Amino acid sequence: MFKKVRSKGYIFITSMLIISMLAGCSSETANESADADTGGHVEAITLNLNHFMSPMHPVHAHILEPFSQQLLEKTEGRVEIVIHPNNGLAAPPDTMDAVESGVVDIGFVLPAYTPGRFKLSTFLEFPFMFESALQANMTAKDMFDVLQEHDYKTMKLLWFGGTDIGDIFLKQSITTVDGLQGLKLRSPGPIYNDVIKELGAVEVSLPVSDLYDALDRGICDGTFMAITALSSFKLNEVTSDIVQVNMYSTPLVMTMNIDSWNKLSEGDQKIMEELLSEFPQKIGELYDSEVEGAIQAAKDKGVKFSEFSDEEMAKFHDLVDPLIDKWIADMEAAGLPGESTYELVKNSAEKYK
């Protein structure tokens, strides 16, 4: 009886070994096929992407989710990106450190959340340089190599760009530039710390994800902010007045841990870069397409829109235009190419106007 059972067990084990060998042959064939496409042995890799937006934000829904799906399909399942919205893996001020250390593979965040660290990246904040998100994003594309060399040399820069153009959101009505004096205004970035000071207001620094609560509780009296944030961050619920000054684009960046990047085959790196090359136009057009709807939704909630008179705008320019020269001087003092960067930005902005 024991011998019969042992015989059956032997047959079973032998059969399993044959099946395993066949499966191994099949797997080897599949790997060889993958190798032919990517130039070497490739293992499936899962990458974690952290960002500060909600799953309902247009960039999450219309850019990052499709990008992740397309990458998975084009790499035939070799590269999967798992997206963590709402600061799921790291808070905004910690995102870049998390990417650099490898706690997060990919981060999508505002460089302004780590003030003073990514100095050249502030160029999108230049007052009155851009008229649309598309123009700002196409200009940013031309800056890619400069930013990789100077601001993001410890990480892989995947994309750099910005939002639609920013205005002034307030909880009260004003008609003059002097009306901003003494107000607590949330700053979107380093240049606007100086802008707010020049306007006689008080600068408040906090992530956009905290802005709703800050406006609601009176921690801020207002903010410089892109119009689409009225809808995407529900700021139309805690804002009463918008002064349209068409000032700047808020810089956004998407970086990757360098070791995580190097784990990808050259073929899969190329696939990712080809998909990312579409971001400047796609993100620029997406933000621009959201502006009109955001304005209408805000008006439906009773938010008032106004503009400064020509005289007041001239006063506004007199206060903030000299800050460009200060930016250039600050960059040069830090050993960065401030003058050449500014000229490149100005020429690119004119080209994409």
Image (cartoon, rainbow, N blue to C red):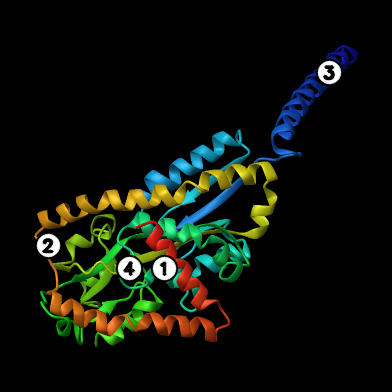
**Image side of residue 174 versus residue 328, left or right:** left
Q: CA distance from mark 4 to mark 1?
A: 13 Å
Depicted 1 relative to depicted 308: above or below: above
Q: Which callout, 2 or 1, points to the residue nearer the camera?
A: 1
* Residue 325 x, y percent position in the rendering: 41, 83
SS for dot 3: helix
Residue 248 is tagged as: 4
Q: CA distance from mark 3 to mark 1?
A: 78 Å
Q: Identify the residue at image location x=25%, y=66%.
A: 246
What residue sits right under mark 1 in the picture? Answer: 346
* Residue 114 x, y percent position in the rendering: 47, 74
Q: CA distance from mark 4 to mark 3?
A: 74 Å
Q: Residues within 10 Å of mark 4 (few under 14, many from 20)?
A: many
What residue sits right under mark 3 in the picture? Answer: 9
Q: Are marks 4 and 1 in contact (CB under 8 Å)?
A: no
**Image side of residue 301 versus residue 67, left or right:** left
